[in-house]
Amino acid sequence: MDLNPYMMEALARYQIEELRAGAAVRSQLRQAARWRQPLRVTLGLTLIRIGAWALGPAHHQLARPF
């Protein structure tokens, strides 16, 4: 079966449109699946790290119960 150039171009355009639509759906799914920490959690962890850094080696002694 021999297709004329118009039909081949139409099929190629259809395939490109399908690929673009699939890529758009995958992109939206990736964006929806991203999980970001809330700002309060990020700030809280940052404050804990700053406090541990400010105490230096003394923060290890505070963490031991005995």
Image (spheres, rainbow, N blue to C red):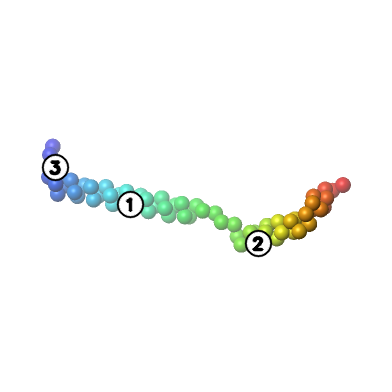
The answer to whether residue 40 is left or right of residue 20 is: right
| Mark found first going from the N terminus, 3 or 2 | 3
The answer to whether residue 51 is left or right of residue 22 is: right
Residue at 33% across, 52% down: 21
Instruction: Residue 2: give x, y in percent of width and height.
Output: 12, 39
Label of residue 41 in the image: none
Instruction: Residue 57: give x, y in percent of width and height.
Output: 79, 51
Q: Distance between the residues labelled 1 and 2?
A: 39 Å
Instruction: Decide: few, some or many residues near mark 2? Use Cα within 10 Å; few <14, some 14-19, many ≥20.
Output: few
| Secondary-structure class at tag 3 | loop
Instruction: Decide: few, some or many residues near mark 1? Use Cα within 10 Å; few <14, some 14-19, many ≥20.
Output: few
| Mark found first going from the N terminus, 1 or 2 | 1
Depicted 51 relative to depicted 12: above or below: below
Label of residue 20 in the image: 1
In this view, the residue in front, 47 or 4, is 47
The amino acid type, in three-letter code, at marker 3 is: Leu
The amino acid type, in three-letter code, at marker 1 is: Arg
In this view, the residue in front, 47 or 26, is 47
Q: How far apart are marks 3 and 1 (CA)?
A: 24 Å
- The residue at the far top in this view is 1
Instruction: Residue 32: give x, y in percent of width and height.
Output: 48, 55
Q: Distance between the residues labelled 3 and 2?
A: 63 Å
Q: Name the residue under label 3.
A: 3
Q: Name the residue under label 2.
A: 43
The answer to whether residue 4 is left or right of residue 45 is: left
Instruction: Residue 43: give x, y in percent of width and height.
Output: 65, 61
Q: Quadrant of the N terminus?
A: top left
Query: Does the rendering let one see residue 62?
Result: yes
Residue at 60% across, 60% down: 38
Indicate which label's residue lies in the foreground, 3 or 2. Answer: 2
